Amino acid sequence: MRLTRSLRLLALAGLAFACANPVATASPPASAPTPTARAPVPVQPIASLPSGTQGFPWWNDTVFYQIFVRSFYDSDGDGIGDFNGLSARLDYLNDGDLNTTTDLGVTGLWLMPIHPSPSYHGYDVTDYYAVNPQYGTLDDFKRLLAEAHKRGIRVIIDWVLNHTSSQHPWFQAAQNPASPFYDWYVWSKTPGGSPGWHPSQNGQFYYGFFWSEMPDLNYTNPSVIKEMERATQFWLKEVGVDGFRLDAAKYLIENVAIQNTVETHALYERFRPFYKGVNPQAMMIGEIWDSSGLVADYVQGDELDLAFDFKLAEAIIISARVEKAETVSDVLTADLELFQPGQFATFSANHDQNRVRSQVFGDLNRARSVAGLLLTAPGVPFIYYGEEIGMAGRKPDEQIRTPMQWSAEKQAGFTTGQPWISVNPDFETINAANQVSDPNALLSLYRSLIHLRNQHVALRLGEFARVSSDHAAVFASLRFTEAEIILVVINLGQQPVQDYALTLATGPLKEAQTYPLVPLLAAGHSAAPLAANAQGGFDGYQPVPELPPYSTFIFQLQPGP
Ligand code: CA
């Protein structure tokens, strides 16, 4: 199994080297300046690099897409999305052909819980070694995995370690204080003074931080750690997933505090050599819904590989809402001080938050700003399914997890039966089929941004420099590696902007050199050359005379003679 996969990736790599044509894939519009016989900086397409670029891990070459399997695509008409349905729709996500741009281009999937569970969402597991039969069989899942890998897509799964379902056989057995499973959970003879304690039939009280039906596992018990290591090994080795998204990662061990305890950090330090021993390429990403400083504590090198940057997500939304660049620029700048280069995950909204369009006044234009900010930022981007077509949804949770809107057909093309929950009534206008051939649609912007990120190393791995602009609505940044320099300019505002000037006091440019610009995302625009100042930055620069409302520009700086 593993050998086959490696061979496939190698085959893909060979294909990529054979057909990679960065000039064609990043073709500037006809009106762009044609630098005199100056070829664009060589770029390395993502799929040619299965194990990472320039010493970075593979996830820094990856754009992830988060999927709620129950809501993605139903293959058998029972109204519930399933593995075979997802397999059937992989070409929408990534067709495995580097020369096409009709797919979204994502190279990683995060699947929300796929294990048996009494809940629709699956965040209370009853068996860590099986899949939810509503989603299919383990063989269906393995086929999905193989199909994804064939296309150069890695797959991580949600991993709910903090608690089990109250219906898990372990918890059932634990009701008996004489059972070896009793100590797998957290018990008290008295109700306790804090919330989270629930009465049991055995007269005692058990701890379940989130809900009475989600009893917390006891990670001070070595048997629990050992069992969860065994389950982790099963998915990495026997099934072949590429990693895990750790649910509620800051809550594993309580002391007097319930979150971010030294014991929880110590547990991850112990866990890391274990899963890296099973597969050195395995990735663990934590959900630590907290301030960025506390998030960064988990990803300093000896605990988790990545963690989600919730503050940045909030900042992206705020900047798009109020049409001012300052908030997102401030947070991105602060992130540089907190995280190892690129070792944080970026997103705009996930399954626990109102959908992006609903957070930006239902405005598809502001949703474009969100896409531009997210996919040009450093870090590892995650896109929640449906955001790329502007799906709407506000809590309660079920309403932000409604079926993917594939088309204007009955039930949005999600199922031939009755969907497990009603599709959003806006599906007749907001759907993938409507946007798939429209170059001005939100979906096209997502596709362009993702494909550019896949093709350009500076967008994926580059350092980030905040470029100041004297116009509040104009966001700008420089992303750069030794090999490539890219300038990003986004007008977050509803008015066209002419009176703006970009300044980078000091930077990585060659002193006093003039750089011609190739527009990578700037249809129909030509850009003025950029003259570096004596400190490797630039002063009062305008790449184009006017930035249209809600527009994202990406320019590649050409190397000097
Ligand atoms: Ca189904």
Image (spheres, rainbow, N blue to C red):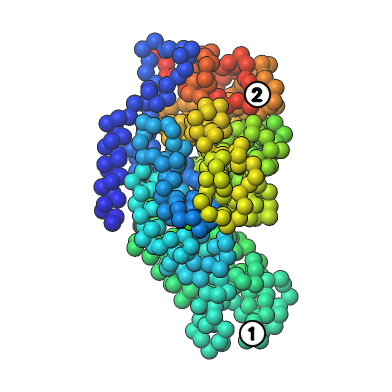
Q: Are marks 1 and 2 in contact (CB under 8 Å)?
A: no
Residue 105, horizontal then vertical, whole percent: 44, 38
Q: Measuring 60% from the left and 32% from the top, which residue is drawn there? A: 368
Q: CA gap, disc 1 to disc 2? A: 62 Å
Q: Nearer the viewer, residue 157 or 187?
A: 157
Category of crowding for the residue at label 1, using alpha-carbon neighbours closer than 10 angstroms: few (below 14), some (14–19), many (at least 20): few
Compared with 461, 75 (above or below) is below
User: Disc 2 residue type?
Assistant: Pro
Compared with 14, 121 (above or below) is below
Category of crowding for the residue at label 2, using alpha-carbon neighbours closer than 10 angstroms: few (below 14), some (14–19), many (at least 20): some
- In the image, is 16 to the left or to the right of 366? left
User: Disc 1 residue type?
Assistant: Gln
Decide if residue 184 is in sight here: no
Q: Pick the quarter of the image with the C terminus.
A: top left
Residue 385, horizontal then vertical, whole percent: 54, 46
Q: Which mark is residue 201?
A: 1
Q: Which mark is residue 549?
A: 2
Mark 2 lies on a secondary structure that is loop
Mark 1 lies on a secondary structure that is loop
Tell me which label, 1 or 2, sits earlier in the chain.
Answer: 1
Residue 123, horizontal then vertical, whole percent: 56, 63
Q: Measuring 68% from the left and 27% from the top, which residue is drawn there? A: 493
Q: Measuring 57% from the left and 48% from the top, which residue is drawn there? A: 411
Q: Pick the quarter of the image with the N terminus.
A: bottom left
- In the image, is 542 to the left or to the right of 305? right
- In the image, is 551 to the left or to the right of 27? right
Q: Which mark is residue 27?
A: none
